Amino acid sequence: MKNLAYLTLIAITLVACTPPLYYPSMVQAPTVHEKGDLEIATYMSPQFGQLQVAFAPHRSVVVGGEFGSDLNTNATDSDERRFYGLNAGYILLPEGVETRLRPTAHVLIGFGSGSTRTAGYFRNDLVSTASYSMIGFYNRLQLTIGGGITHRNVDLLFNSRLSRVSFYSLDVYGNTALGDHENAFVEPTMTIRAGGKHLKFVAQAGLSIPLSDADFQSSPLIIGIGIQTDLNLERFMK
């Protein structure tokens, strides 16, 4: 029992001194509305590059997916981050001419999985080798509520994502970290898109705010820039 308590204390101490294990992905903020609408966005951020896709199989219904990956996978001593997620929900967007400003609102629910590996670099007289000091795998449940104004050439959207992050595997320097590895986050963001009807510049900035103390570190910022392509598949295929 004494050894178990000692190991737990070491694990918690090591977790507290390491870089973040949870890096929030960009918040999905779709404006697809008509049947066949498709949005494809790519982001660059300090955390990782990200691809988002949103599609309207029926009017006002949206399904989406996201994939995030860090861009330093070829470096043996770099951190590694991954995230995969699916979303589905409903969008309110009144009928109107695309060249007029229109209010929009949406609600999405989703699920995703991710992993983080923080690299440590060890050196001795004979060999230098990179190893991973912490390895974590997690699931995330999320609810996103947002809205704003949309136009053929510009969108301004405000979102709030409530995320429940649960690490189901957490390894600290070769030892299984003990304790409760869950926390909830409120993640408000602002998204701006500007450009032509089919291609827009997109930028997003926000925060990831933990709702309670947790024994894993998290990154507090959500920030990224990229481009987005918009089209309607039904009209495109005609």
Image (cartoon, helix red, strand yellow):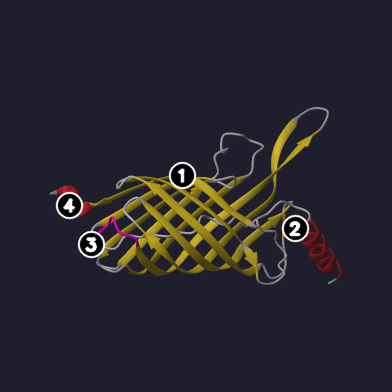
State the residue position of label 3: 35
> In the picture provided, is 214 more to the left or to the right than 156?
right
Mark 1 and mark 2: Cα distance apart in space: 33 Å
Label whose residue precedes the other's in the sequence (1 or 4): 1
Distance between mark 1 and mark 4 Cα atoms: 25 Å
Amino acid type of the residue tagged 4 in the rendering: Arg
Residue under circle 4? Answer: 235
3 or 4: tag closer to the N-terminus = 3
Part of the protein shown in magenta: 97-101
Q: Do the residues labelled 1 and 3 touch (CB within 8 Å)?
A: no
Q: What element carries label 4?
A: helix
Question: Which residue matches tag 2?
Answer: 15
Q: Please state which of the two labelled residues, at mark 1 or mark 2, is closer to the viewer.
A: 1
Type of the residue with mark 1 = Gly
**Residue 99: horizontal and vertical position, in percent?**
28, 55
N-terminal-most mark, 1 or 3: 3
From the image, tell me which residue sits under label 1: 226
CA neighbours of label 2 inside 10 A, class few (<14), some (14 to 19), many (20+) = many
Instruction: Compare marks 2 and 4 and give the one earlier in the sequence.
Output: 2
For the residue marked with disc 3, what is the amino acid? Lys
Please name the amino acid that badge 2 sits on.
Answer: Val
Mark 4, other Cα within 10 Å: few <14 / some 14–19 / many ≥20: few
Question: Which residue is most to the right?
Answer: 2
